[in-house]
Image: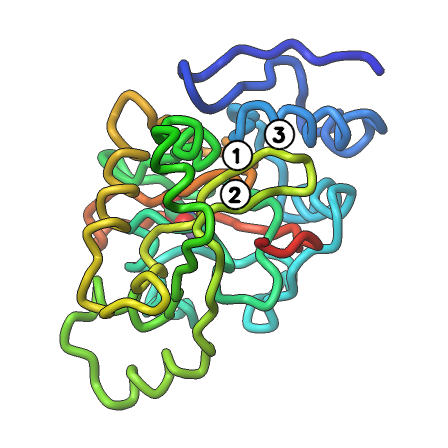
Amino acid sequence: MPAVATRELSEQVGVEVLDVDAERLVTDPDLPEICEELLERYGVVLFRELHASDAAQVEFGAKLGELAVFPKFPNKNVMEISFDPGNPLAPYFPSNDFWHIDGCLDKMIAKTSIMSARVITEEGGETAFASTYLAYEKLTDREKEQLADTRVVHRMARIQKLSHPNPTPEELADWDRWPQRIHPLVWEHESGRRSMVFGATASHIDGTDPAGRELLDDLEHRATTPDRVYTHTWSVGDMVLWDNTGLVHRACEFDRSQPRRMSRSTVLGSEPIA
Ligand code: OGA
Ligand code: MN
């Protein structure tokens, strides 16, 4: 398989693919497999200023697996991430500012997320990534033992309340449309690697008082110290893929009166958190 030229983006997370343009993205038959290998190894794969159209993003994404359908958007495989008044999902997007895993409340966790920058702000609006594989590796042996059977309750209300601290009854009812999910804290992947599953949807440790969050907060804090984070500063046309099964990510603050628009596609997963 012909390799592509790459450059690491930080010590812990991320790699940039250097010699692929928008045409090669959809025509090179080896690229999907190369990307999967890079995702497994680096977590984040960047194509800088690729300017792939939504259609090209979908065409490429579909080679990585079945794509999620977002019925509310004109291209059913592309969710528009923006605070534009007409965006039907805009009320949910403030929650992207908190470390999270996409689709933690879905029946099956998403495998890969793909996002292209269409309109960016002059300041802020970066996207930050931290490895949950590394988070597990860096636990002490004693912690690995202690946490082996820990299970965590994930709730939509937990992540949404962070940005809507005084919810209306309608908002509360809306969030409850997502049933809570209980996931193991330590995910042993089919590959044999272990990652951790925490972030803003994580409400509390199963079987403990929902108010007791010290452990979850501590794990998230340790996993996301600046030396473990790759923060991507976007240029228009950048396309980033991330391994949603081995990373937490978040959007960084920006002036929401300024337009920022991203196109996101999601490759569905087939491996449950277990
Ligand atoms: C997402 C997300 C981050 C961003 O779309 O799932 O977390 O920077 N986006 O917009
Ligand atoms: Mn996300």
The answer to whether residue 194 is above or below residue 46 is below
Instruction: Give the alpha-carbon distance from disc 2 to disc 3, as whole Å.
Output: 17 Å
Q: Residue placed at 78% from the left, 42% from the top?
A: 63
Task: Write down the residue under mark 3.
Answer: 40
- The mark nearer the N terminus, 2 or 3, is 3
Q: Is residue 155 above or below residue 148?
A: below
Does mark 3's beta carbon lie closer than 8 Å to ligand 2?
no
| Whether residue 91 is visible | yes
Amino acid type, label 2: Met
For residue 129, side relative to residue 60 (left or right):
left
**Nearer to us in this view, 2 or 90:** 2
Whole-percent x and y of residue 101? 44, 51
Q: Quadrant of the N terminus?
A: top right
Residue 261 visible within the image = no
Residue at mark 1: 240
Are discs 2 and 1 less than 8 Å apart at CB?
yes
Residue 33: x %, y % from top left: 77, 29
- Give the residue at mark 2: 115
The residues tagged by marks 1 and 3 sit, at their Cα atoms, a distance apart of 14 Å
